[in-house]
Amino acid sequence: MIRINENYLKLKASYLFADISRRVTAFQQANPDKKIIRLGIGDVTEPLPEAVVAAFHKGVDEMADAGTFRGYGPEQGYDFLRDLIAKEDFQSRGADISGDEIFVSDGAKCDTGNIQELFAGDIRIAIPDPVYPVYVDTNVMAGRTGQNVDGRYEGLVYLDGTRENGFIPELPGEPVDLIYLCYPNNPTGATITRPQLKAWVDYARENKALILFDAAYEAFVRDPELPRSIYEIEGAREVAIEFRSLSKTAGFTGTRLAFTVVPKTCMAYDSQGGAHSLHAMWNRRHTTKFNGVSYPVQRAAAAVYSPEGKAQSRALVDHYLNNAAIIRKEMTALGYDCVGGENSPYVWIDGKMGSWDFFDMLLSKAAVVCTPGAGFGSCGEGYIRISAFNSLANVQEAMERLRAVLK
Ligand code: PLP
């Protein structure tokens, strides 16, 4: 008899975005003439930068010619891209990262989900709340938690994000081995300062712990005082793995390209205390289970780092940042406390009522879709997330409708 991995039975039955979609569909069916504006799911709306499209086409043409055709490439990514990323994203900012420490992949979602396969089943894991759900669910699937009791899984150490701590959790009160951090944060839009991040790096060094740093939204950081990479913090090379993605940086959500940085100095330990290179382990995992990102997509990604590509990607992010600023300004003027929306595409709003109640009110009265904070963890109850990923016209219209309903 084929048996299932029963850890899957612990997962909460319904997925947040499926719940939202069900309510939105029901509303649209009951109100077929209403134009719904979706400021919920974090997908980009604007097309790829021109320089990226040109390089993408050229890559496809090369595949059509026997002289330049390519079959399997290196699983870790082509050197032309890995070296460019190391230079432009890290070395240029004083972070000591080399091209062979970059692992190119087809998504930060898969990488953040897959990485935990390198670690023992009984490690202690610290998870922020509210949180990008992938970190939690992948550990549940792997059997690292007990049951979900009142919205929290037994066996995880939750790091509470609250209005008081500005959604930057304090260091854990009990020992942990693996720490998930995401800045600029999804869902709260909060950003972390260098001293705050340094405290986490120091904690990890003192406790032989490891930080998984998700920097999927680093391109939204405009404040020069804020870190864009954890490797800008002294000592991080020994205790941190960083995840990056071109999804939000350059509109690659449908094109797919991300990368994971695993410094060669990053170690984890066996049961006897022996140190093992996580770079070697991730390399083994990646080459065994992944066969590389397609050549034209890697060429398209390299174009993000060309002078034109940089300017066009920056303009793309500026567009969303402008939307975020509008949302934040409007909601603040309406008397709501906001986090994020600066150096981030997400605005996290204290709705002053239940998350789903606020969601239902905005949908039914304004035909605007947001994301209920409660879907990201129990600390999200009472909050909603509004995303800046949309056209300027849609954001302006959504804000007009919200003003009419909430003032
Ligand atoms: N990490 C965070 C925090 C995200 O919000 C997202 C996407 O929304 C991802 C990772 C996924 O990125 P990718 O499109 O590269 O899989």
Image: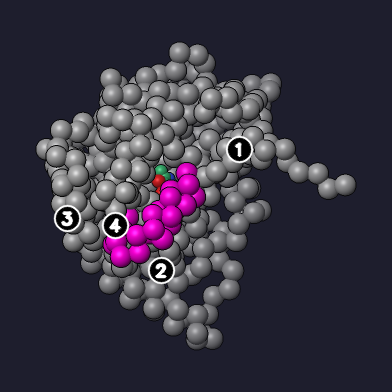
The residue type indicated by label 3 comes to: Gln
Residue contact between numbered discs 3 and 1, judged by CB atoms under 8 Å: no
Residue contact between numbered discs 1 and 4, judged by CB atoms under 8 Å: no
In the displayed orientation, state which residue is furthest to the front. Answer: 30
Up-down relation of residue 270 to residue 213 (above or below): above
In-image side of 369 versus 396 (left or right): right
Q: Place residue 335 in its image quadrant.
A: top left
Q: Which numbered disc, 3 or 4, marks the residue that appears first in the sequence?
A: 4
- Mark 1 → mark 4, Cα distance in angstroms: 30 Å
* 3 or 2: mark nearer the eye: 3
Magenta span: chief secondary structure: helix
Q: Residues within 10 Å of mark 2 (few under 14, many from 20)?
A: many
- Mark 3 → mark 4, Cα distance in angstroms: 10 Å
Residue 248 at x, y = what percent? 34, 54
Residue 21 in magenta? yes
Between 105 and 140, the residue placed more toward the observer is: 140
- Mark 2 → mark 1, Cα distance in angstroms: 38 Å
In the displayed orientation, state which residue is furthest to the left. Answer: 333
Q: Which numbered disc, 4 or 2, marks the residue that appears first in the sequence?
A: 4
Colour basis? one colour
Residue beneath disc 3: 396
The C terminus sits in image quarter: top left
Q: Is residue 253 visible?
A: no
The residue stretch that appears in magenta: 16-38
The residue type indicated by label 1 comes to: Leu
Residue beneath disc 2: 299
In the displayed orientation, state which residue is furthest to the right. Answer: 1
Residue beneath disc 4: 37
Residue contact between numbered discs 2 and 1, judged by CB atoms under 8 Å: no
